[in-house]
Amino acid sequence: MEVLIGVIAFLAGGSIAYFIGRKSLLGKARNILKEAEAEAEMIKKDKILQAKEKFIQLKADHEQTINERNNKVLMAENRIKQREATISQRIEELQRKKQEQEAIKNNLNNQIELMNKKNEELDRSIRMAVEQLEKLSGMSAEEAKAQLVESLKSDAKAEAMGYISEVIEEAKMSATKEAKKVVINTIQRVATEEAIENSVTIFNIDNDDIKGRIIGREGRNIRALEAATGVEIIVDDTPEAIILSAFDPVRREIARLSLHQLVTDGRIHPARIEEVVKKVEKQVEEEVIEAGKRTCIDLGIHNLHPELIRLVGKMKYRSSYGQNLLQHSREVANLCSIMAAELGLNAKAAKRAGLLHDIGKVGEEEPELPHAVLGMKLAERYKEKPDVCNAIGSHHEEVEMTTLLAPIVQVCDAISGARPGARREAVESYIKRLKELEDMALSYPGVVKTYAIQAGRELRVIVGSDKVSDKEAETLSYDIAKKIQDEMTYPGQVKITVIRETRAVSVAK
């Protein structure tokens, strides 16, 4: 019983404590709720304020955008109004001009009608005058016209020739002024040494005793040398000299170097000769390639095919009319480069074409082709550009010129080759050309004498004063120049001077 009473007392105390704690917790919860509600109210007020500020900012931006759009619309409307006003003015001006044109047109139509009437009256007057003239002269109008044309024909021809001469001179002065300037500047900026090479080479020796060793027993050494080199070796009474004769300069060079090595070494016999000649041939071939490479480096020409480089070096041992071919090609390359630069063209391509323009002269295939055409084929084979190939093939006009480089190469080749002293010309062909010039001028009626002077660069033509008039002398000069240009081949230019004079001779007795 006592235990039961204790348990009941314990339970009653715990319930009281539970209720007291619960009450305390409920109070705290109410305080927390109140604080949360106060904080939520503050946050709500802040958000409302922020929302109001954002709304006010957006409203201001929107109003600014609307104002800007309104301003742009106003400006566009003003521009449209200005354009409308301008168009209206133009329309009014066009209408005014149209009215003026209509008035001018009506005026012209009236004048044309008046002119037609006057022309009809004039035609009637002319017909009546012609009929009266025919009656008085006893000739028809056609016969009178033919007679008048015949009488004025010679005068008209003379006047036309005078006019043609004036036009030609004016065209030459205006058209060739810049060309002369370019050519002169080009020539002045290039200076090249030219040495004339013959078909023989002199090999100097220290004493004449070496001649016997070169000839050998019963001439076996000299025969072996000639057979190995293909050069004729002339051993005569010329003191301390042996002459090597051949048209191929490469063979002459091989023979000269072989002789030099044999004489220096002292062992001269057929087996040694063959050995030395083979060695020298290889050495000369290397020198040819080296000369080609050095030439390309000096001129600044790159990416040239090795075979073309070899042919360029081979030009060192070739000559044309006594002019060294490699020196000529180098000079033409420099001239082409300068002239192309003056004219605003590709200077590198022009220099390349100038160097290769005579490559066909050392070509080893198809010798029956002209050297310009053969050179063009070689350049095409070794992948040169089409403008360079055309310039090579057309520098003697055997192929049609299709690029601006072609006339430049042709002109520079003429500058280098036609310069006085650059080339030699056979006496027979020189005399023949002078005689052809004189005979061609003598074939014209009225020509008394002809003289080719200044190495064929000027032709003096003397005509009879009783057979050729002053006007006809101008025509004759033009005709002779045209015929020479069409029918003859000559370097440079030929000046034709027609001389007509009247002499009165009396004798005092």
Image (cartoon, rainbow, N blue to C red):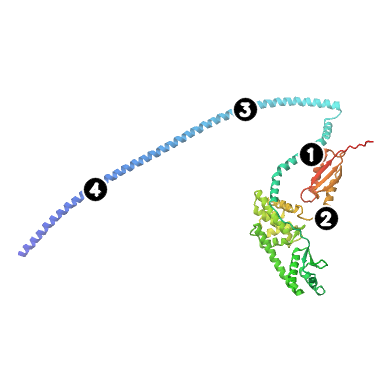
Q: Earlier in the sequence, mark 1 or mark 4?
A: 4
Amino acid type of the residue tagged 2 in the rendering: Val
Q: Which callout, 1 or 2, points to the residue nearer the camera?
A: 2
In the rendered image, the vertical position of residue 500 relative to residue 301, given as above or below: above
Real-space CA distance between mark 1 and mark 2, rounded to the nearest whole angstrom: 38 Å
Q: Nearer the viewer, residue 232 or 347?
A: 232
Where is residue 64? Give x, y as percent. Answer: 39, 39
Q: Earlier in the sequence, mark 1 or mark 2?
A: 1
Real-space CA distance between mark 2 and mark 4, rounded to the nearest whole angstrom: 128 Å
Q: Nearer the viewer, residue 445 or 42?
A: 445
Residue at the extreme left: 1
* Residue bearing the label numbered 2: 427
Give the secondary structure at mark 1.
helix
Q: Earlier in the sequence, mark 2 or mark 4?
A: 4
Placement of the N terminus among the 4 image quadrants: bottom left
Numbered mark located on residue 39 in the image: 4
Placement of the C terminus among the 4 image quadrants: top right
User: Does residue 383 show up?
Assistant: no
Q: Are marks 1 and 2 in contact (CB under 8 Å)?
A: no
* Residue bearing the label numbered 1: 161
For this view, does 313 lie left or right of residue 442?
left
Give the crowd class for mark 4: few <14, some 14-19, many >=20 residues within 10 Å.
few
Q: Residue at x 81, y 27 (%)?
A: 130
Amino acid type of the residue tagged 1 in the rendering: Met
Q: Are marks 2 and 4 in contact (CB under 8 Å)?
A: no
Give the crowd class for mark 1: few <14, some 14-19, many >=20 residues within 10 Å.
some
Q: Are marks 4 and 3 in contact (CB under 8 Å)?
A: no
In the rendered image, the vertical position of residue 350 relative to residue 85, given as above or below: below
* Residue bearing the label numbered 3: 102
Real-space CA distance between mark 2 and mark 3, rounded to the nearest whole angstrom: 81 Å
User: Does residue 195 show up?
Assistant: yes
